[in-house]
Image: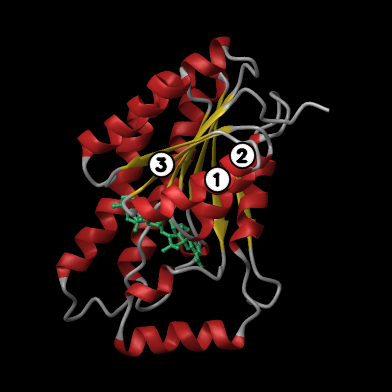
Amino acid sequence: MTSPLAGTVALVTGASSGIGYATARALAAQGASVVLVARRQDRLDALAAKIQAVGGSALTVLADITDRAQSEAAVQAAVVRFGRLDILVNNAGLMLLGPIVGADPEEWERMIAINQKGLLYMTNAALPHLLAAAEDGPRRVADIVNISSIAGRVAWANYGVYNMTKFGVNGFTESLRQEITKKHVRVGVLEPGGVDTELGSHNSGMMRDSIDAFYESTEVLQAEDIADGVVYMVSRPRHAAISELWIMPTDQA
Ligand code: NDP
């Protein structure tokens, strides 16, 4: 049987850990050639070796997506290596929690730079190739999956700027979907609840304590659960687009 994504090329940002890592593996298992983008080369190399060991095809690209030139170079590297791009998973992200009152605006800038600007730079660089894949690629459809969050649907105290970045991702996704869906580039948003990854580890003090308490008291999702969702979204028949997918731990109210 042919793998559903055989012949396709998928680029995943933030592939060095957590959801991006699991998603890249899952897409490769479905037959996609995967382009692994992040800043930690050792992690990317280890993942590429795992994928190649089971017959998959992977390219690692070291890039800080907050830098527009590096984002553009990452997409270019994918196209030079594999000749095309069918799927973009905008996954890289950062969550720094805390009150707005007395906050360090440098933390806000870092979140906006990764969660929003990086996603925009990658999308902008990828779009010409995705439009081309939708027009004359083997599937005649292409995909952008933006990893947002439950924090893109619901706001909580101490999540202010993270909420802002993810609400923004949801709005941008829907706008772009309407702009290009008739060209058969599907643009969808996936909103996870709590997932067991490194995301909370960049926090400290009381916020870190409250994140740790949540993870200790909740049976959270695994990164593979979200990877399953991405695979589902990008492997629908050409006429069916999953515009929004909200995946929660059963244990999280
Ligand atoms: P991780 O911290 O495990 O992964 C984040 C990834 O982003 C890493 O691979 C990191 O790689 C990459 N990254 C960070 N900054 C940059 C940058 N400037 N340039 C390139 N890559 C970068 O967290 P998750 O897997 O949980 O996060 C993935 C996405 O899922 C995020 O968008 C997050 O907001 C979202 N999400 C996560 C939830 C959770 O509970 N875990 C819930 C809802 C949404 P490196 O450091 O090597 O660059």
Q: Position of residue 80 (x, y in %)?
A: 38, 20
Which residue type does callout 3 highlight? Phe
Element assignment for label 1: helix
Q: Cβ of disc 1 within 8 Å of ligand 1? A: no
Residue at the spot of label 2 = 28
Label 2 with label 3: CB-CB less than 8 Å: no
State the quadrant of the C terminus.
bottom right
Toward the front, the furthest residue is 53
Q: Earlier in the sequence, mark 2 or mark 3?
A: 2
Q: Secondary structure at mark 3?
A: helix
Image position of 17 (left or right of 247): left
Mark 1 crowd level (few <14, some 14–19, many ≥20, 10 Å Cα): many
Q: Say the numbered circle drawn on residue 24.
A: 1
Q: Are marks 1 and 2 in contact (CB under 8 Å)?
A: yes
Q: Residue at x 46, y 59 (%)?
A: 17
Q: Are marks 1 and 3 in contact (CB under 8 Å)?
A: no
User: Which sits earlier in the primary sequence, circle 1 or circle 3?
Assistant: 1
Whether residue 238 is situated above or below residue 198 in the rendered picture:
above
The residue carrying mark 3 is 172
Q: Amino acid at mark 2?
A: Ala
Quarter of the displayed picture in which ligand 1 can be seen:
bottom left
Q: Which numbered disc, 2 or 3, marks the residue closer to the eye?
A: 2
Viewer-nearest of discs 1 and 3: 1
- Image location (x, y in percent) of residue 35: 46, 36
Q: Residues within 10 Å of mark 2 (few under 14, many from 20)?
A: many
